[in-house]
Amino acid sequence: MHFPNIDPVLIQIGPFAIRWYALAYVAAILLGWRYVVTMVRNPKLWTFRAAPATAEQVDDLILWLTLGVIVGGRLGDVLFYRTSLIWTDPVEILKTWHGGMSFHGGAIGVFVAGLAFARAKKIDPLRLGDIIVAAEPIGGFFVRIANFINGELWGRPTTLPWGMVFPDAGPLPRHPSQLYEAALEGVVLFCLLRWATHRKHWLNRRGVVMGLFLAGYGLIRISLENVRQPDYWMPTFPFGLTMGMMLSAPMVAIGAWLVWRGLKEPLPAAIEGAEAPKAADAPA
């Protein structure tokens, strides 16, 4: 199969260009924001604890998280993947429109922004993290689709019938790893977290949803690194490891610990007037 060669620029008006990649981030922020607002306004999700933030506080939180994603994503890309830019072309670090955003850097940026917001507003950071990560796969889906449109972050060579020949990637068919990531990091992970929040009511358990996201994303990313082509300038790590694997492994460990800790923590008394979950859906 040949790459469909979609123009990464949706609209060009003189020097002004609207790119699919930028629209992916806009869609991720707007849809994620509205999804979190819907959750905090849904009393059925907060049977044992009140929502950690009001809808108005979520509105304020979005600016903090947006800055965290942009700054953290760009700095993470430089520190983890393009360290030489620091001494060869430091001005390039500021040119975010040239691309180059790291998920792990963005995650660290969101963590720092969320923690600072929680401290400023006196909100439990674990419970704030639970509602933030519940919406993250929405953004993950759109950004990976944008990666595919840009013809970047392609996979390793494959003989499978859906292997795709990407521009600037040589003549060999390759895994469309961006679509694998959109499906698993986006759709599958969203469904898993939706099950945790709306069926198991784990938003009432501090840190469990955040832990499930960290462990789930980490395991998916580690598995997909086996079919994703590492950047050509990256060094060869021992045992076939990649930078993505090494950055994701701590996520799995921290996430597993958060799930274990949160499920052990006793629940408070049910909120008066709140609709209790059905027996089959009650927290474990």
Image: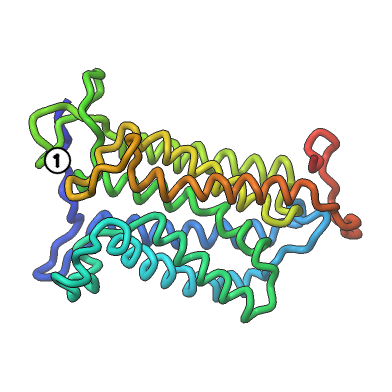
What residue is rendered at 39% in x and 55% in y? 103
What residue is rendered at 48% in x and 48% in y? 137
Q: Quadrant of the N terminus?
A: top left
Give residue 167's position: percent from left, percent from top: 11, 40
Task: Identify residue for label 1.
Answer: 5
Q: How many marks?
A: 1
178 or 44, nearer to the observer: 178
Question: Would you say 230 lies left or right of 3 here?
Answer: right
What residue is rendered at 25% in x and 19% in y? 160
Give residue 195's position: percent from left, percent from top: 64, 40
Q: Label 1 is placed on what type of residue?
A: Asn
Give residue 254's position: percent from left, percent from top: 59, 51
Question: Would you say 44 lies left or right of 187 here?
Answer: right
Q: Quadrant of the C terminus?
A: top right
Among all residues in the image, which is located at the extreme front?
Answer: 238
| Image quarter of residue 4 | top left
Q: For mark 1, does the 10 Å Cα neighbourhood hold few (<14), some (14 to 19), or many (20 or more) residues?
A: few
| Image quarter of residue 116 | bottom right
181 or 79, nearer to the observer: 79
Q: Is residue 62 above or below residue 272?
A: below
Q: Is residue 215 above or below residue 173?
A: below
Give the SS element for disc 1: loop
What residue is rendered at 59% in x and 69% in y? 58
Among all residues in the image, which is located at the extreme bottom?
Answer: 120
Give residue 189's position: percent from left, percent from top: 52, 41
| Image quarter of residue 153 | top left
Question: Would you say 70 lies left or right of 211 here?
Answer: left
Question: Would you say 28 lies left or right of 282 here?
Answer: left
